[in-house]
Image (spheres, rainbow, N blue to C red):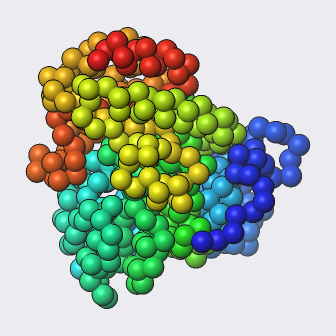
Amino acid sequence: MKEMSSQQPETTAITSGRDNSQSLAPPIWTSTTWQSSGLEESRQHALATHEIGNYARYSNPTVRAFERAIAELEGAQDALAFGSGMGAVTSVILALCSKGDHIVAQRQLYGGTVAFLNGPCARFGIDVTFVDGSKPGAFADAVIPGRTMLIIAESPSNPQMGLVDFEQLARIKGPYTLVDSTLATPLGQRPLDFGISLVMHSATKGIAGHNDAMLGVVAGDKDLIDSIWGYSVMHGATASPYDANNGLRGIRTLGVRLAQQCTSAQAIAETLSANNKISAVNYPGLTTHPQHSLARTQMRRSGSVLSFEIASGIEGAKSFLSKLSLIRPAVSLGGPETLACHPASSTHISVSAEDQTAAGITPGLIRLSVGLEDTRDLLADITSAL
Ligand SMILES: Cc1ncc(COP(=O)(O)O)c(C=O)c1O
């Protein structure tokens, strides 16, 4: 594992992504095109990479400031932003994989990613093998030498909060490794420190953090980011400067937001564990989590998301959601409002019943994205709904 710099990541969240200007908040560059001094400069711009765009689909200074901040937080050489988390993951897959290639993917991935791997990837002749990401050796065993281009993992996984061992994953030689680190945020863990090739986030979630921006980002070595950028300008899932500005603003307060969310999530997980109407609680901060010791070695914080199983199944889940008064029934995560959802009928509805069962998405499973309300009020709402 790479040595971390002595500056704490919460401080880097304040110092990162800044240029030499005296304005503390970044300007929002709204222009889609830039004037040049003539043919020679136009030619240079047209040949330039990600760094200097002459057209906003190629690069935009506000988006670039957000990308630099993420690169610094992730300990990466560079980063590339997209119009959503799905824009990021699909661009990476299509930039790196061609017809005849093979992907090894964790079974417990965000439903949209699973749907993309099962649908368009199959249609384009890219084969996918799904494995249980928390099972030691599962990724390595599924690799086909010379054909596997990419391994996709999500840790913690959505919604079962299973972890993937980054050190073990990074030891696999050959394919690129991609970790969806959305549920942890860049202040919760840094997969690149363990040798993972690329880390990605739906920055729509905890990074932007206020349910007001659609944004995705991927970070890694410059050469790899440059080659993904070369594809991304054709794919066109471009990040908006307004959303990038909200992403950068979110980064500034991520440290305090995440600390509060983790404190509440831990208290809720412990309270639910002691309730006899609940048959399982999934949260890496619990000592009963099967990978708690791995969480302690590779995560700085346990995250703002947890899931739990209501023993009475779908009827219990329906009744619980209908009786909440402070917590809102809604998808998404990482924002100020605590949200509860039923993954089997929302985030993972596009996943087949068989695959839902294999991924542990049961009829009684509820996912909670813990927000910024006072912990005592959240506990009171949950206890009364149960
Ligand atoms: C873990 C994870 N990855 C990716 C995505 C997709 O992100 P977006 O909704 O920003 O496209 C989501 C969305 O919920 C997610 O939870």
- Residue placed most toward the observer, 262 or 197: 262
Please report the residue visible at 70 percent of the width from the left and 39 percent of the height from the top: 252
The number of numbered discs placed on residues in the rendered structure image is 0
Regarding residue 209, the answer to whether it shows in the image is no
- Tell me: 160 left or right of 56: left
Which residue is located at x 46 percent, y 19 percent?
A: 378
- Image height check: is 19 above or below 29? below
* Image quarter hosting the C terminus: top left
Residue 303 image position (x, y, % from top left): 50, 42
**Residue drawn at x 24%, y 25% as measured from the top left:** 277
The spot of residue 183 in percent (x, y) is 46, 46
Q: Nearer the viewer, residue 232 or 44?
A: 232
| Foreground residue among 209 and 17 | 209
Q: Pinpoint residue 55: horizontal percent, then vertical percent.
A: 60, 56
Looking at the image, residue 140 lies above or below residue 202: below
Mark yes or no: residue 366 visible.
Answer: yes
Task: Examine the image and state in which quarter residue 225 appears.
Answer: bottom right
